[in-house]
């Protein structure tokens, strides 16, 4: 039985199929994987900030986070979205525990870059606690808000948090988004790339194929692969039975691997 970290992006949380939460429970019950959910919340955060007339500025796909934003971000992530996902799993018949990265020092963080404000990098993961919850048959649902030893909160990019957790657990990572994977244009037609190595990812970043919010997603994936995670898959979270297809080892989305010789685009 293997751990499986599933990152559910803020852009897709409200659009997952009605069967998604039952699918999670079925995957856990199959005995092949112990799922762990890490979620984003960008759409709700932006909406709440707009209502408060607080502008959002992004640098390389990361939201520059000011002190006045932190309460809004924590409320959206750890309050509304985290509990909504947890409730949905419970209603589907599973056992779930909603957690913030602050709880039990799950995600200890530090400031990533002063230009980004209170955006955090993960410096430690309490993976022992996550393992214990999984062994007790719970599905952990993690909100990516972390804290440093001084009590300062940080907004952690959900892709980064998911990659750090997967790296600690040495398990596969699935990034659910609102796109079918990484794609390239050929004669004006978008085609999903089935697999990429780290070297190929770097080329696509340099030539502008990978931009915006996809950059922290693939950078987190690269870090996870370098830490020993065997594969990262970027897939469309709106696709019916997408997770089941992945767990059944069917081709879906874009698979990212470390070694160039393993797969070809």
Image: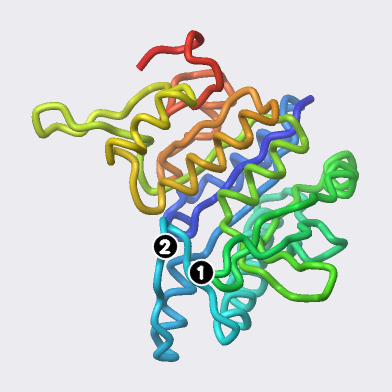
Vertical relation: 6 (above or below) 107: above
Q: Residue 11: horizontal and vertical position, in percent?
A: 42, 58
Q: Residue 196: horizontal and vertical position, in percent?
A: 43, 23
Q: Nearer the viewer, residue 56 or 250?
A: 56
Residue that mark 2 sits on: 59
Would you identify the image quadrant in which residue 54 lies? bottom left
Q: Residues within 10 Å of mark 2 (few under 14, many from 20)?
A: few
Q: Nearer the viewer, residue 83 or 131?
A: 131
Q: Is residue 40 left or right of residue 111?
A: left
Vertical relation: 196 (above or below) 88: above
* Helix, strand or loop under label 2: strand
Q: Going 15% across and 27% down the picture, which residue do you hit?
A: 186
* Helix, strand or loop under label 1: helix
* Chain-order first, disc 1 or disc 2: 2
Residue that mark 1 sits on: 115
| Real-space Cα separation, disc 1 to disc 2, in angstroms | 9 Å
Q: Can see residue 98?
A: no
Q: Nearer the viewer, residue 6 or 57?
A: 57
Q: Going 48% across and 8% down the picture, which residue do you hit?
A: 261
Q: Quadrant of the N terminus?
A: top right
Q: Do the CB atoms of the residues marked 1 and 2 lie less than 8 Å apart?
A: yes
Q: Is residue 254 left or right of residue 68?
A: left
Vertical relation: 44 (above or below) 87: below
């Amino acid at each position: 039985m293997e751990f499986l970290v599933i990152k559910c992006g803020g852009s897709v949380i409200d659009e997952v199929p009605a069967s998604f939460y039952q699918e999670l429970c079925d995957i856990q019950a199959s005995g092949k994987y112990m799922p762990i959910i890490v979620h984003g919340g960008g759409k709700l955060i932006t909406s709440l900030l707009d209502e408060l007339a607080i502008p959002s500025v992004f640098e390389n796909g990361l939201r520059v986070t000011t002190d006045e934003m932190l309460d809004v971000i924590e409320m959206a992530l750890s309050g509304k979205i985290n509990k909504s996902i947890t409730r949905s799993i419970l209603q589907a018949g599973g056992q779930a525990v909603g957690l913030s990265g602050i709880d039990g020092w799950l995600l200890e963080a530090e400031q990533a870059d002063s230009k980004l404000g209170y955006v955090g990098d993960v410096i430690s993961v309490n993976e022992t606690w996550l393992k214990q919850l999984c062994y007790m048959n719970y599905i952990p649902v993690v909100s990516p808000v972390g804290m440093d030893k001084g009590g300062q909160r940080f907004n952690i990019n959900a892709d980064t948090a998911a990659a750090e957790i997967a790296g600690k657990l040495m398990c596969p990572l699935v990034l659910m988004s609102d796109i079918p994977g990484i794609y390239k244009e050929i004669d004006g037609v978008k085609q999903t790339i089935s697999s990429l190595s780290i070297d190929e990812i770097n080329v696509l970043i340099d030539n502008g194929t990978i931009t915006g919010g996809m950059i922290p997603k693939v950078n987190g994936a690269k870090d996870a692969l370098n830490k020993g995670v065997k594969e990262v898959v970027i897939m469309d979270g709106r696709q019916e039975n997408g997770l089941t297809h992945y767990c059944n080892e069917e081709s879906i989305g874009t698979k990212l691997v470390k070694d160039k010789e393993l797969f070809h685009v």
